[in-house]
Image (cartoon, rainbow, N blue to C red):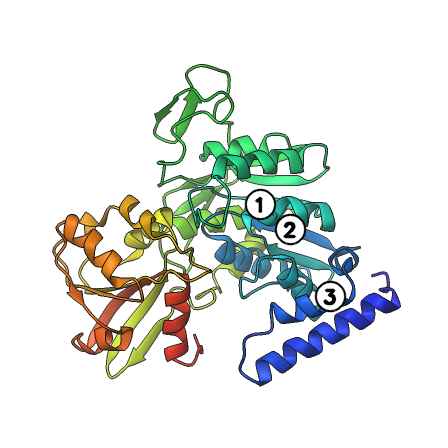
Amino acid sequence: MTQLPLRAQLASALGRSAATLSRMTGRGDGSVIGGRVGLLLEPDLLRQLARDRKLALVSATNGKTTTTRLITSALLELGEVATNAFGANMPAGHVSALSQHKRAPYGVLEVDEKYLPEVLATTGAGVVCLMNLSRDQMDRAAEIWLLAQKWRKALSGKPTHVIANCDDPLVTWGASTAAKVTWVSGGQRWKEDSWCCPECGGPLDRKDADWACRECTFHRPEPQWVVDGDAAIDPRGQRWLLDIQLPGQANRSNAVMALAVAETFGVPVDRALPRLREVTSVAGRYTTVERDGRHARLLLAKNPAGWLEAFDVADPQLPIILSVNAQGPDGRDTSWLWDVDYRILRGRPVFVTGERRLDLALRLDVADVPFTLCGTFMEALAMQPPGRVDVIANYTAFQQIRSEFGRAV
């Protein structure tokens, strides 16, 4: 790799030192502060760190962190990979990740949907993975149709190879200006944000996974990769069993996206898939923690689409603890709770906690779901009999729960 200019070397070194200090003092994992320090000293640092690397950018409303981890695992077949493993998905996090692995020839970066155009323009990444778009943090992020439009503009005229989920009409529209697209049928359980054609505004007709606009020519492309139950079908028609350790249909979809990306880097399925099977937890997601004989499995859900996927993973035979906050990273507005269909929880013990537990309690009451209100997560956990329990929490509530267990998960 080309050596960085002296100013960039200094900025990168000081950023790494700040990150190390942050970790040593217990203030954080250093994945943001290190990048901020580096960018303060050299505003063009991200471009310089990205130069001469083969990069993949991963963006979506849900599943970014998991898919980034899966792709990274697959690309380790080729050598060292720089990645923002803790989900710091804005430019400061990208600078920190590339600085920490300054000699890695490969990079896989999770990118916030809003920042994708900027990061693509800055890094010149050769591969972009786009999985889904749905409402999320509407008090911070733009309307998702505007995000898809920005993706279109960002990809137009670029030589970037896009791996995109063709089952999501908004993703398809956002990706369709790219020079080269590999289409993946990854599924779309949440459809409430894509009943209208993003091209003309007309109604979309849907039949199973297929969709087409009733009033213009916009339609679902033919996929090269397909998620078929617990298997992946590759572009050659070969079927591969996805016996990965991460649970749920959404993660099987994430795995197929990862396989498609890995193949663009030259890693065949028979070498990539065993790597994917080694991933058991992603930044605490799906980890089981134990306290006084109670085994709590942690599931993250940040928006209506995410809750739908969490319900798919949750065991209907177990009690469930729900925790919701509304801090800055979550979005201050909790009105999205009303878009989640909580009736699936009827018949199982439900415990509600978090800073906005009363908002969630009202929503459950209207859905006629009995629940127990708890002041803290530990209070809710203590009310469980010894054995297993599922926990669904949004972002900062999830991080608080991890902190209760020393973030060792």
At label 1, which amino acid type do we have? Cys
Q: Amino acid at mark 2?
A: Ala
Name the foreground residue: 195 vs 335.
Answer: 335
**SS class of the residue under badge 3?**
helix
Assess whether mark 1 and mark 2 are in contact (beta carbons under 8 angstroms).
yes
Give amino acid for label 3. Answer: Leu
Label 2: which residue?
56
Q: In the displayed structure, does residue 18 sit left or right of residue 358?
A: right
Q: Which secondary structure lies at badge 2? A: strand
**Which residue is nearer to you in this view: 36 or 247?**
36
Residue at 60 percent of width and 63 percent of height: 84
**Residue located at (49% from left, 20% from top):** 200
Q: How far from the left and from the top, in percent, is residue 297?
A: 32, 68
- Residue bearing the label numbered 1: 129
- Which disc, if any, is residue 398? none
Identify the mark at residue 40; answer none if there is no mark.
Answer: 3
